[in-house]
Amino acid sequence: MTTESKWWQHGIVYQIYPRSYQDTNGDGVGDLFGIIQRLDYLKSLNIDAIWISPIFPSPMHDFGYDVADYTDIHPMFGTLADFDKLLAEAHQRDLKILLDLVPNHTSDEHAWFVESRSSRDNPKRDWYIWRDPKPDGSPPNNWLSFFGGPAWTLDQTTGQYYLHQFVTQQPELNYRHPEVLPAMLDCMRFWLDRGVDGFRVDVIWLMIKDEQLRDEPPNQSGTSVQMGEYGKLNHIYTKDLPEVHGLIKQMRTLVDEYDDRVMIGEIYEPFEVLVQYYGKQADECHLPFNFHLIISEWDAVAVRQRVEEYEAHLPEGAWPNWVLGNHDQHRVATRTGYEQARMANMLLLTLRGTPTCYYGDELGMEDGYIPPEFIQDPPALNQPELADVIGRDPERTPMQWDDTTNAGFTVEGVTSWLPVTENYKTRNVALQLSDSNSMLSYFQQLTTLRRAEPALNRGDYATVKIVGDDLFAYRRDHAERDSFLIVLNFGASKHQLDLSHVGQHVQIALSTDLQRTGEVDLATLTLHGNEGLVLRLG
Ligand code: GLC
């Protein structure tokens, strides 16, 4: 795309996990004032939009993804007035705010569910998915929770089971009931009217389930340990049902009634399924989240294949996007190794499509060690033997601002809700801002370059053929502006290559090694271990 583009196309999205960003009231949990305090820092990262994980009233069984009221703010985070202030201050700095909408399920403390569970004939009974037990008293079918165990819980008062694919306190809404979607659209309208710039929509691909509640067949294709017990079934009746697209269209229609807003959908699926969420008429998600850099094997060949496959699958007019980390996945610096975290960010920020960065990845924050007695995350508590693999606490540790106690996340003497990662004394914002070679300085240069260069933030993509299994190279081209060649080394050893078919003497626009500047000869290009280069082709 070389014409005008929207902010959510050329811009960068940055995810904040609000419990862990900045605590200002000394309760050990982050808050909205904390984010307000850090807006200048956020601006200095050259990001365009902040997506904040849920900040609504919630009993916090799934740390906010169990919403008890969609149209208010949890007192732990602040008030609606604080939110309005955050929005105004962000907008003043030309930063957008995206909220996390969780429409698939509510908290069991949500007024809708309290009514629904009160009696079998309550008018809201069928807003949720209730079924009688089997004759032997067991759950209505074999569906499983993502977090381990059955997806059904028996409600003693009314003698029926309700469906929940996450914790028991997250009952699933029934979008086959005609009143449910309009109620959710009202909640969206509440925030859109207040001025939010869009939503990241939680588990959008799960919103409709099989009407007959048929048993799911066993998973024949093998499963990853990351999926835990849930991976044992093939989820043909709980995800990607055709009717979900009708729902998403209606959500999108609402979002489009407002100027310049965006809807991003959370979908973990292969490309052929993922791209269906753009909608046949480009009338569903603006951006169906693409998690393939997270789920791919981390090597040059596998990553190149994913990039090419994605590019090939994108329907006409669909804008790509890439995600490198989030609150559900081990941190990128842990997955790739710290030595490759710069190169990984270069990949994210130079591929074609909207990048989403996870807080702290600009510093190379790594997974924290969570001693067993501090584990908070429900899947890890439910399946302790898999805690190291499926637990999500390690990637949610407090932001490392400085080397004072609690890393500047909260005040001294307060215990933060998750332990601060041990390396905070040497890996923190303050230290890295004072070091012109730090990962943070590098990240700022990378985002500055991306922002300044249309070829990088909206240009075309083409793979460049290259010899060597550790290497991945591609071009980004713009009809009227400079083109770039990106060469990435996924290995630890040095390579010398001949890329004279691409050009001759070219300028280094940026290396992962900030001290490497100047001109290179593409006929004898040297790439150090773990190095990435952005070269200006002119
Ligand atoms: C999404 C969220 C995750 C949450 C789950 C249930 O996958 O990203 O954190 O636990 O949905 O809401």
Image: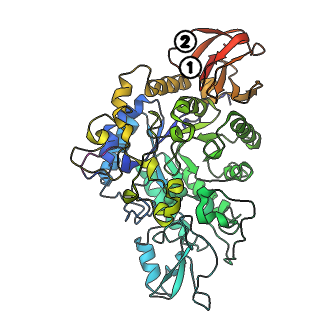
Instruction: Answer whether residue 242 is magenta in the image.
Output: no
Instruction: Answer whether residue 24 is magenta in the image.
Output: yes
Query: What's the magenta region?
Result: 22-26
Q: Looking at the image, can residue 202 be seen?
A: no
Residue in the foreground of this view, choosing between 187 and 271: 271
Q: From the viewer's perspective, is residue 308 above or below residue 154?
A: above
Q: Residue at x 37, y 57 (%)?
A: 374
Q: Residue at x 44, y 30 (%)?
A: 45
Horizontally, residue 125 falls left or right of residue 532, namely: left
Checking the image for residue 19, the label placed there is: none
Q: Residue lying farthest bottom?
A: 135
Read off the residue under disc 2.
Answer: 517
Checking the image for residue 511, the label placed there is: 1
The quarter of the picture where residue 104 lies is bottom right
Magenta highlight: main SS: loop
Horizontally, residue 498 falls left or right of residue 196, namely: right
Query: Tag 2: residue type?
Result: Thr
Q: Counting other residues with Cα less than 10 Å from the Cα at mark 2, is it few (<14), some (14-19), or many (20 or more)?
A: few
Query: Tag 1: residue type?
Result: Ser
Query: Residue 89 at what x, y percent from top left?
Result: 35, 38
